[in-house]
Amino acid sequence: MSFPRLLTPETVDQAIELLQVPGRKALIFGGGTLVQPFITLGVDHHDVVIDLEQLGLNQIVLENDQITCGSMVRLAQLAEALPREYIQTAVASIGGPAVRNLATVGGNIFAKPPYGDLATLLLALDAELEFAEGEGLRWLSLTDFYRRRDHDSRASDNTILVTRLRFRADGRRDIVFRKLARKNLNSASVVTVAISLQFDRRIVQEARIALGGIHQHPIRALEAERVLIGSTLSAPVVESAAQAALQGCDPQSDAYASAWYRQRMIPVQVRRALNSLTTERIAPATD
Amino acid sequence: MASNNSLQHFSFLVNDARYDVLAPPLMSLGEVLREKCGLRGLKHGCQQGGCGACSVQVDGKLVLACLMPVAHVDDKSIETIEGLAQSDQLHPIQEAFVESYATQCGFCTAGMIMAAKALLEENPSPTREEVLVALSGNICRCTGYQFIVDAVLSAATKARSTKQAVMNNRLDKLLPVQDLRFNGDVDHRNLKEIGTSTPRRDAISHVTGRTVYFEDNSFPGMLHLKMVRSTHHHARIGRIDFSEAEKIPGFVRAVTHRDVPNNYYTILRLIGVEPNDEPVLADDRVVYWGEPIAAILAESPQAAAAAAKRVKVDYEPLAAVFDVEEALKPGAPVVTRQGFNYFRYEGHHCRRVRFGDVAQGFANADLIIERRWDTSPIEHAPLETTGCIAKPDGDGRFTVYTNTQALYFSLDNTALILGIPASRLHFVGGTVGGGFGGKVDVMVEPIATLAAMLTNRPVKFAYTREEEMRISSTRAAERFYIKDGVMLDGRIIARQITLYVDSGAYSRHSPYGTTKAAAHMPGPYTIPNVWVDAHCVYTNRQPSSAMRGFGVTLGDFAIESQMDVVAHELGVDPLRLRLINAYRDGEMKAHRKRVEGAALVEVIQKAAELAGQKLDPDLMAMNSAAR
């Protein structure tokens, strides 16, 4: 048999210790939707698999408008616990019911495009995540977490232990999630857009625009955010934000869509997402 | 805390019965249920969470058995398709699937039913939209889903009335399992079948998970075959180094072209097509990405995959050609061993049809209309991947369990490749988890049988989902140049067609498909001057082959698209254009076969009526018997 050894730590400290044993190739096992096929199909060799199942990372805590969620919380569990429309829409857009019963919130952070739709939403929500570094744990914003990964190729995704995520859910922000896919249900992303805006009366005070399905991980459309801040969502502002979202995007081609098509869909999806917010804020939307 | 790599004990309930198994903790639940518990109702269509055929419930929750390690179900309660029918009474969902004709090949059925069960337990009265969401993780390639959704909605109603039935102690209202089975003794003398609904004879077997597909056979000591495949589109092969592969625990042996008695074949040699152009295993070169080079045999699928990955092949890359017209140009990379990139039809470079005089037709025409039409390769995407198990019997014969759509083609070709009499082979097939023409290529049986001969052990060779999608044959890509000479009144008086069929690297069924394509031109129309050159072209793409109506379907796409263009250019109604030119009984087709039993005129008239499209009286007066 060529199955790796399965290690099942019972505390986070034990897990960190196991990950630090030198000289062996390790693989973290969360919900299994990404990792189990690697093992079954013998895609890559690993010496040990470190299972997070027994770490008690499956809690969702809502405290002072802040949601803290264990990395092992299943997508279906998240949707059940948080009846907010943007969470429901994002979770419902991923896989089928059986996959949502297994896939974890933490695992979605590492899902490669055209997957990772929940991570796209989390990026727009300014989520932070807690992960193992050295012998301890530290919090970092998801934006910075991805930035660090881009610059540090030594750390394999397979051995980054994420324990918790947290994000605000205070109702002061307008949030929208939009996923363009080849079919309505259970289809990977062509372009995913998640936007969170905070208004003061009609002026945008704070903007987060995240794009999924484009890059190796979800990315922020920083130029588009800049266009929005300090403005109302007038049609010209929406249009220029939509165009600005293309800056820094270098979409990939895969079986779902060509880079050419994704490139064209980015501004369209950003515009539609913004327009869905303007219908409430201003009206009338033009789309 | 740490478990060891060797077998570990797990205990769980399946359908209320306790199972104690020894398994590696990271073996998938699906593999454990199928191989250790013998519960083979769940199917593996992809082993990566994409198809839903392995859907089961764990502690009531719907999951995919391919995505869970057995370590995660210790002490849990699992429900599978085998637990649904109670004491020979079908579950209401199973009954509804039978009655609604919701099964076809049956490979997705168990997963569909388990997903439906999980839905109805949570939501006994779902809307159609809710059913779609609940089944969205389950793929069916055959039915188009509507009958399946109908079945789930009907099961919901049925379950409610069944509850009533149970309360009234009237369980007999449920259909007994045995009642709908095929009965060859039924008296059919009255033959009153038209207008009545007859249950599919395999439906009960499908809904209960009892249908036996090739992979549902398992034998002690069975080896697993994994192919080492080309990572180049075109290359010369140098040394093949197995030394790292041999170190993988469970590695048994490698098989190369040197082990194959008659390495070269072509499937249709059985009906006189030549030459034998395709090797079972590549010898000195590869001509497409994914071409098989060596077969690795190992004790488990994982060991076979790990060993195959460690085989080092020295390649000397060569220029490759991917376009049919480029491949026919002088100086193009040569794909075939014959030295030219086309199939030779009785000495000719293409299949030709000559009828009348197109040059004269074009000279007499009011207008010339020319267009080019292209199609892409299409994968059949059956839910069950291509595969077989070859087993040495005690008497020198081999039994081969296969999902081929062409049982005797496979048997005869295997005998020829292995150089043994056909009487030494016993092929068992007929149950196919979706084919669509994609399982007629004799790809797995010869090498698996050879491996069984070389090791004297049963050998299983099943494509992974990736192999099925990227390496197995596709429908051929075709290119058409159509030039029409037309009169202003809508008559087409000349049609010249040059068509190219991309056969990929080898022949398989494409030379035959090209002949069909040529004979199908110029479509169901009587055109007095026709000229067709149909080229079957070799390129460094994966070989193409049979698929539903191959040679015909794509020609129809091109011709009917062309007809619409002609109608548009002439300003003639597209139906009028077709009715004017439609062939009539007794007329001569371009390939010299007289038309008999034509009905195109009547079909168009009826279709127009059904679509609410009014036809002019002169068109309504037409018929297929006379012009």
Image (tube, helix red, strand yellow):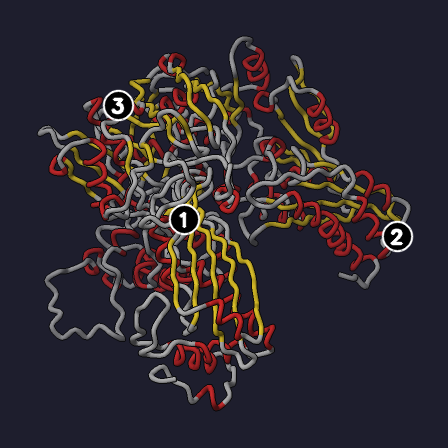
| Mark identifier at residue A232 | 2
The subunit letter for the residue under badge 1 reads: B
Q: CA distance from mark 2 to mark 3?
A: 74 Å
Q: Are marks 1 and 3 on the same chain?
A: yes
Residue B96's spot in the image, x, y percent?
34, 60
The residue beneath circle 1 is B536
Which mark is in front, 2 or 1?
Answer: 1
> Earlier along the polypeptide chain: callout 1 or callout 3?
3
Q: Residue at x 32, y 28 (%)?
A: B225
Residue B586's spot in the image, x, y percent?
31, 78
* Left-right relation of A81 to B563: right
The residue beneath circle 3 is B259
Q: Give the residue type that dot 1 points to.
A: Cys
Extreme right residue here? A230
* Left-right relation of A125 to B605: right
Q: Secondary structure at mark 1?
A: strand
Q: CA distance from mark 2 to mark 1?
A: 62 Å
The subunit letter for the residue under badge 2 reads: A
